[in-house]
Image: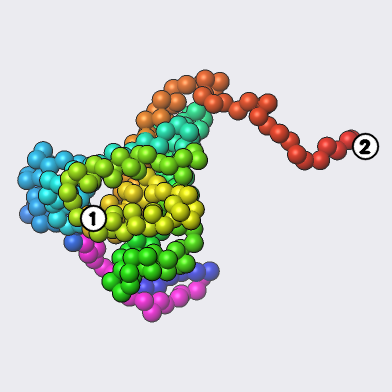
Amino acid sequence: MNEERSGESIKSKREVAEKITTRIWYEKGKKDNRFYPEKSICWGYDFYGDLLGRYSWTELLFLLLRGELPDEKENRILNYVMCSVMNHGPRDWSVRAGMNAAIGKTTIGNCLIAGLAVLQGSYCGAMDMEDAMRMFQKGLSLLKEEGVEEAVLELLKEYPEIPGYGLLYSERDMRAVRLIELVKEEGFKEDYLRLAIEIEKIVVEKEQIWLTLGGTAGVILLDLGFTPEQGAGIFLLSGSAGILAHSLEQLPKDWNEYPMYWNPEWHIYEGTVREEG
């Protein structure tokens, strides 16, 4: 590959791929127009011929990410997880970011981008879920070598911030409790969930914190076979629904109709006051 830079020719030693390779999606072209997708194949299935209209959004998402269709129980559990984190509410900073963008009269796409940029953060966001999922993976491998309490204590030394655990406005997050109840009612495998609950017993005594909704969703996604990166992506996809709804609500409004609009009385200035001259 040759590149022109400041009139000089620079030869790269790295070969450039000439084909896109993917196991996920294949578009079969027509004989007289190879660019026209006569069939769209998703993991071996005819997407528009066999899948569309027969399977739900969560089933097809499962297929896209895992390469196989879920059974009924797996689909219900994925649906529970995605619904549980679909709207964090207008007090949440990611939703507020979308609302702020909307009241500024930008596009709905920019509102979603603004909200998702915040939602992916490490404080109760997708990065926290991803870290928690990695912690649980490490914890399950430790359990194969040590007892539960020893494994958990060793794990907490490596993860002193304890991702996936915390408080919701100074209280236990009961949304997480409800999500766990739903999964247990399904009688689904709970290898990671059991570990998370064992960790919770210890951190409650040490830190007075419990599983957060994001941490609970992450551990259930692990039991469904998703990776930490996939879990973070599912969290963002799900949360985009709430960002979209609240942003759309603000989009047609004027700036002075914005809820929780900044009040000068809330602004405390702690800087220096300088006199002119």
Residue name at image x 46 percent, y 67 percent:
158
- Magenta-colored stretch includes residue 15: yes
The residue tagged 2 is 277
Residue name at image x 33 percent, y 42 percent:
177
Query: Magenta residues?
Result: 7-22
Point out the image quarter for the C terminus: top right
Secondary structure beneath dot 1 equals: loop
- Magenta-colored stretch includes residue 185: no
Can you say whether 253 is above or below 194 in the image? above
Mark 2 in CB contact with mark 1 (< 8 angstroms): no
* Residue 151 falls in image quadrant: bottom left
Secondary structure beneath dot 2 equals: loop
Residue name at image x 57 percent, y 26 percent:
261
- Which secondary structure class fits the magenta region best? loop
Point out the image quarter for the N terminus: bottom left
Residue 111 location (% of width, % of height): 43, 36
Q: Is residue 227 visible?
A: yes
Among all residues in the image, which is located at the extreme bottom? Answer: 13
Q: Which mark is residue 190?
A: 1
